[in-house]
Amino acid sequence: MTRTVYLNGEYLPETEAKVSIFDRAFLMGDGVYEVVSVLDGKLLDFDGHMARLQRSLDALAMKNPLDTAGYLAAQRELVARNDIGDGLIYLQVSRGNPGDRDFVFPPAEVQPTLVMFTQSKPGLADSPTAKTGLRVISVQDLRWHRRDIKTVQLLYPSLAKMEAKAAGVDDAWLVEDGKVTEGTSNNAYIVKDGKIITRELSHDILHGITRAAVLRFAHEAQMSVEERSFTIQEAQQADEAFITSASGFVTPVVEIDGVKLGAGTPGPVAVRLREIYLEESRKAAV
Ligand code: PMP
């Protein structure tokens, strides 16, 4: 089936959606993005993703081409046209096409480019890694210092992911000044003596929408949460570990740099948080 994608207000077959070679995202990585999960044809954490999109755009003085109602209508339309049960919506806004290459931002009349497309992922919530857990290695965090802005500049996370694959594991946890920042495309957590520990929000990490929801559910369930950074050594001695992201929800981590955590199987806190997250966000899905 040819996918129907969204480009600047139009729904087009994917083969007909064309963006200029002068687009600032293509030449300079001058764009921001969001990924929204779809379960049973409904959008998860939609408001949170739209709020973060606005935050990223504001941080880069980029115009938002649509309002929240417009995004909701377009995303629902894409879900319907592509018959998505479980999957995701990728959304990208770039500073548009100035008609040439220049470091200086284009004049205000240059319109942003807005692209949205679906990816079908049947059984997204039943991924095998939720049961087996992930194995990760640590990799130096060499990204720029505004990781709180969700830009399309994903080369370093992609290199780190490839390093993990080359090492025969699933993913990498990035380390800066001896402390874990986050995963290549997810937020990182450890659990010790029942306490959930995850790095505090700053410019050093992406402010995960799933992170916000999971911490809220953890507080509601009277679980104790400490927002602070931790080392790889502390993580290796933790009782359990996990990651969160929009498409991975809550996924256990069972091994860090070759050291198994506890029994080397998913821990009870991660398993419970995954259940709560999926249950609550399905209920609130739009
Ligand atoms: N950190 C990074 C670097 C990410 O790329 C992502 C996923 N885009 C996350 C954290 C998790 O964020 P979210 O829960 O909003 O998907």
Image (cartoon, grey):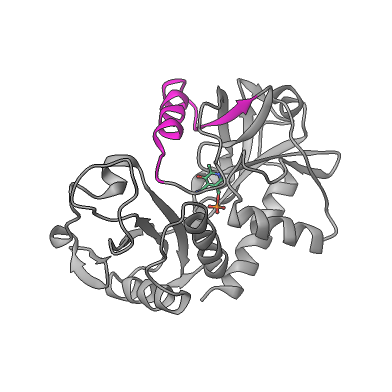
Q: Where, by quadrant of the figure, is residue 29 drawn?
A: top left
Q: Is residue 30 left or right of residue 27?
A: right
The residue depicted at 31 percent of the width and 47 percent of the height is 25
- Quadrant in which the N terminus is drawn: bottom left
Residue at 77% x, 57% y: name it.
218
Q: Quadrant of residue 223?
A: bottom right
Name the side, left or right, on which 47 lies relative to 178.
left
The residue depicted at 52 percent of the width and 50 percent of the height is 248
The residue drawn where x is 37% and y is 58% is 93
Tell me: residue 142, above or below residue 113: above
Q: Is residue 173 magenta?
A: yes
Establish if 253 lies above or below 39.
above
Residue stretch in magenta? 152-176
**In this view, 137 is above or below 282:** above
Of residues 168 and 228, the one drawn nearer to the viewer in this rendering: 228
Q: x%, y% of residue 132?
A: 57, 40
Among the 4 quarters of the image, the one containing residue 101:
top left
- What is the total number of numbered labels drawn onto the structure image? 0
